């Protein structure tokens, strides 16, 4: 297995590089990339691009890497979104700006190759947009606790539920305990270790100013399924948590007819960090999705 961390070309004086690019129709479109965008690459083969959620970084998705590696033949590109992890925010100030930044990065790194995309939470919304914008060479789409409705007040959500409480785990976490308890459905030492290793580092390194700026324009201009209403016929996967109080599961399932080749899963005993809460099942579902992509 190969693993490397790579950046991009030098920035302009404002920290944001802009250049003309060509859309599918050959017309000039705006394109930009955040200078020094942080990308971790592992493996070789067909590109699989992974986007994390809001306020964390690429490390939240690394628990899936073993399943992807076992599937074989996938070059994994874990991208830190602007203002997260190792990627500076530049002038990014909205979800649409994030799309511009990551799509420009993809043009540089993937070129004309077909690729697949997986996104978590806010990154799931970005992944849906990328999948539709690059539909002509998109191999497959997966989201894990993906955002389908940007405005939190408009989401259909289950009540906040903690199935198993363990005060000793919270005591051991100290000042980090409230962040863990906010998401944990089943409190356990194993689950807390996963949170500390994969979620907390991104929470600690996110740019709060950039997060506040982007959160004010968190929604896409148009939902991808509405902007491109023809059914998305590539293999897809949508993993949701039955006890997820952040995005729920209902709003993803409401888009079922748009994805005729999708597996939809609502996992019990799982919250917003569903792939940490139910890691074995989530990894098996991702492996199944990759197998379907590979044979399509």
Image: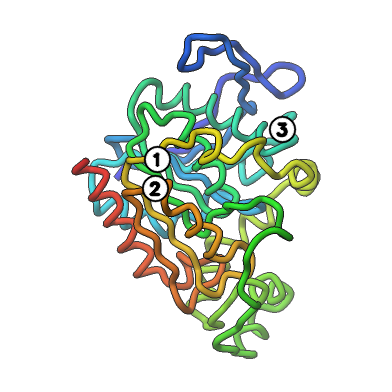
Check the image and report above or below for 152 versus 14. below
Q: Nearer the viewer, residue 104 or 125?
A: 125
Q: CA distance from mark 3 to mark 1?
A: 31 Å
Q: Is residue 87 at all visible to an observer of this figure?
A: no
Give the structural element (helix, strand or loop) at label 1: loop
Location of mark 2 (residue): 259
The numbered disc on residue 231 is: 1
Residue 4: image quadrant is top left
**Which of pointers 2 and 3 lies earlier in the amino acid sequence?**
3
Question: Whole-percent x and y of residue 20?
Answer: 59, 11
**Which of pointers 3 and 1 lies earlier in the amino acid sequence?**
3
**What quarter of the picture does the C terminus occupy?**
top left
Q: Is residue 47 at all visible to an observer of this figure?
A: yes
Location of mark 3 (residue): 92
Q: Nearer the viewer, residue 216 or 179?
A: 216
Identified at 62% across, 37% down, the residue is: 222
User: Crowdedness of circle 1 by 10 Å Cα count: few (<14), some, many (20+)?
Assistant: few
Q: CA distance from mark 2 to mark 3?
A: 30 Å
Q: Nearer the viewer, residue 263 or 174?
A: 263
Check the image and report above or below for 116 versus 159. above
Q: Are marks 2 and 1 in contact (CB under 8 Å)?
A: yes
């Amino acid at each position: 297995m190969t693993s490397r961390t790579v950046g991009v070309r030098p920035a302009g004086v404002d920290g944001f590089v802009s250049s003309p690019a060509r859309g599918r129709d050959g017309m000039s479109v705006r394109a930009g990339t955040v200078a020094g965008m942080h990308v971790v690459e592992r493996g070789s083969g067909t590109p699989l691009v992974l986007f994390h959620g809001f306020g964390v970084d690429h490390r939240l998705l690394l628990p899936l890497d073993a399943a992807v590696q076992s599937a074989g033949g996938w070059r994994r590109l874990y991208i830190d979104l602007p203002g997260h992890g190792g990627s500076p925010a530049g002038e990014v100030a909205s979800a649409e700006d994030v799309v511009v930044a990551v799509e420009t990065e993809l043009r540089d790194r993937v070129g004309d190759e077909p690729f697949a995309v997986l996104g978590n939470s806010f990154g799931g919304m970005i992944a849906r947009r990328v999948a539709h914008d690059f539909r002509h060479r998109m191999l497959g789409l997966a989201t894990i606790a993906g955002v389908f409705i940007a405005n939190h007040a408009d989401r259909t959500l289950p009540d906040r539920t903690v199935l198993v409480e363990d005060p000793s785990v919270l005591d051991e976490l100290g000042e980090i305990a409230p962040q863990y308890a906010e998401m944990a459905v089943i409190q356990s030492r194993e689950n807390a270790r996963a949170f500390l290793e994969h979620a907390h580092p991104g929470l600690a390194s996110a740019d709060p100013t950039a997060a506040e700026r982007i959160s004010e324009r968190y929604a896409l201009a148009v939902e991808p399924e509405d902007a491109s209403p023809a059914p998305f016929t590539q293999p897809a996967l949508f993993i949701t948590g039955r006890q997820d109080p952040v995005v729920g599961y209902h709003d993803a399932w409401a888009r079922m007819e748009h994805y005729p080749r999708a597996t939809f899963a609502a996992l019990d005993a799982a919250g917003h960090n569903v792939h940490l809460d139910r890691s074995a099942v989530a990894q098996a579902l991702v492996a199944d999705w990759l197998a379907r992509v590979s044979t399509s």
